[in-house]
Amino acid sequence: MLPTLDYKRVLLAILLVIISIALLIGIIWLIFVRDPVPGQPPPGSVVDPGGILPGTGPGGGAVVVGPGGNLTGGDDIDTGSGDADDNNINPIISDRADGSFTKANSLIDVDVKNIKVSNGGISFLNASDDKFYRMSFDGDNVIELSDEKFPFVEKATWSDNGRKVILEYPDGANIIYDFTQDKKVTLPKGAEDFSFDSDSDKIAYKFIGTSEDDNWLVVSDSNNSSARAVEPIGDQGNKVQVSWSPTNQVVALYHDPVGLTSEEVIFIGLNDENFKSLIVSGSNFKGLWSPDGKKLLYHTVLADNEYNPILWIADADGSSIGNNNFNLGLSSWVDKCVFASETKVYCAVPISLTKGSGLYPELLNDKADVFYEINLNTGISRLIAYPVLSSELDEFQVREVFLNDNMTRLYFFDNFTDQLYYIKL
């Protein structure tokens, strides 16, 4: 005998089918039929990170920095009046850094490299004639530091006073040149990663020999007449950053992994001092001393930030080493930063970064930069300038940054053109 038909269950099943069909039709309409919301890109389109900056308004107020240092929120830059056609818009370019498009000024019309700002001027190697020059901050006065030519220089490391320079060549040869005495001193082959002390009288470097037992951190006077091995480095040379502190107490920073997501930074002194260490999140540590050596600005590469660099700040002097260690929220490298004081830093920050740029910056970092001012007392970062050359909105990628003596100009060496520019602060 057949069971009695349950009409309530049949009606419920029919209702569920109708609801499912209605939901399916709604989803299809939302994705494929409905017009896009005005002002939003259609699904799957790519938004160009260049051009208009978010988060900037008149006067360059504080900018909210999102995860990884990306610019977020705020009003678009006022680009001035123009026709309805976007191609005819005339952007407003400020003469000084005020948080918007800012005029970048060319300082000298030659390709320069190996720059040093010190004692009221800028020293550099002219890539055209292979001579060293010194130039005033306004670019009007340029003098030869030496009539000798220095071709094939691969890298130059300047003393703080700009009077001496260590030159490294592709064949491994190294020399110190003293411009005040026109004196040249040969350094041993195998020496690399040089750093002058704050008095410009001593140098530190890594010596890489024919075997790991020969690899040492070395300190010498600038005449190379009293070299002294300070610390064996074995096969750990890639973890040693030679960087003489302003106090002359620390000559190098050694970073070693601790677990899977952090590193321990050890401060290496001249006489086996037992300095406190600094624990940092991420990998690929590199540091930059503050003017008095009390703080260390550094970057590390974080997996949580798509293997891109993040800037941090920490105390770095004596018993306070490791205190006040916090994330500044900007994705950039310390190579693109300069201290204005113990409490203020200027940094060039890429508009966006390809995943993995922190591990392979020379291959993956091809983005333009904007400038931030960082208050180290509060940790607040403020966008101050999107540097452009003209109304064509030519972009720049910063390799190094410098300040003049009265902090009114921010100079930068551009990777795209190999030339030196500045913006007014």
Image (spheres, rainbow, N blue to C red):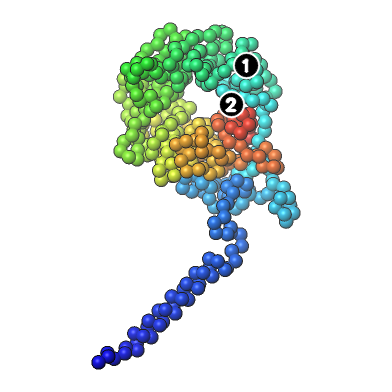
In primary-sequence order, the first of circles 2 and 1 is 1
In this view, 67 is above or below 109: below
Asked whether residue 242 is in view, the answer is yes
Question: As shown in the figure, which amino acid type bears the numbered disc 1?
Answer: Lys
What secondary structure is marked by label 1?
Answer: loop
Q: Nearer the viewer, mark 2 or mark 1?
A: 1
Position of residue 146 relative to residue 269, above or below, is: above
- Residue visible at 41% across and 45% down? 304
Residue nearer the viewer, 9 or 284: 9
In this view, the residue farthest toward the left is: 1
Q: Is residue 366 above or below residue 139?
A: below
Q: Position of residue 49 (x, y in %)?
A: 57, 47
Q: Name the quadrant of the C terminus.
A: top right
Residue shown at 62%/21% (left/top)? 127
Left or right side of 324 for 386: right
Q: Residue 63: where, in percent of width, then height?
A: 54, 47
Q: Nearer the viewer, residue 249 or 181?
A: 181
Which amino acid type corresponds to the residue marked 2 in the rendered image?
Asp
- Residue situated in front as seen by the camera: 400 or 155: 155
205 left or right of 93 in image: left
Separation (CA) of disc 2 from disc 1: 25 Å
Q: Depth check: 389 or 9 in front?
A: 9
Mark 2 highlights which residue? 405
Check disc 1: other Cα within 10 Å, few if <14, some if 14-19, many if 20+. some
Seen at 43% across and 41% down, the residue is: 307
- Establish if 63 lies above or below 136: below
**At numbered mark 2, what does the secondary structure look like: helix, strand or loop?**
loop
Estimate the x, y position of residue 275 in percent, counting from the top left. 32, 26
Q: Which mark is residue 131?
A: 1
Please report the residue visible at 67 percent of the width from the left and 33 percent of the height from the top: 105
How crowded pointer 2 is (Cα within 10 Å; few <14, some 14-19, many 20+) is rated as: some
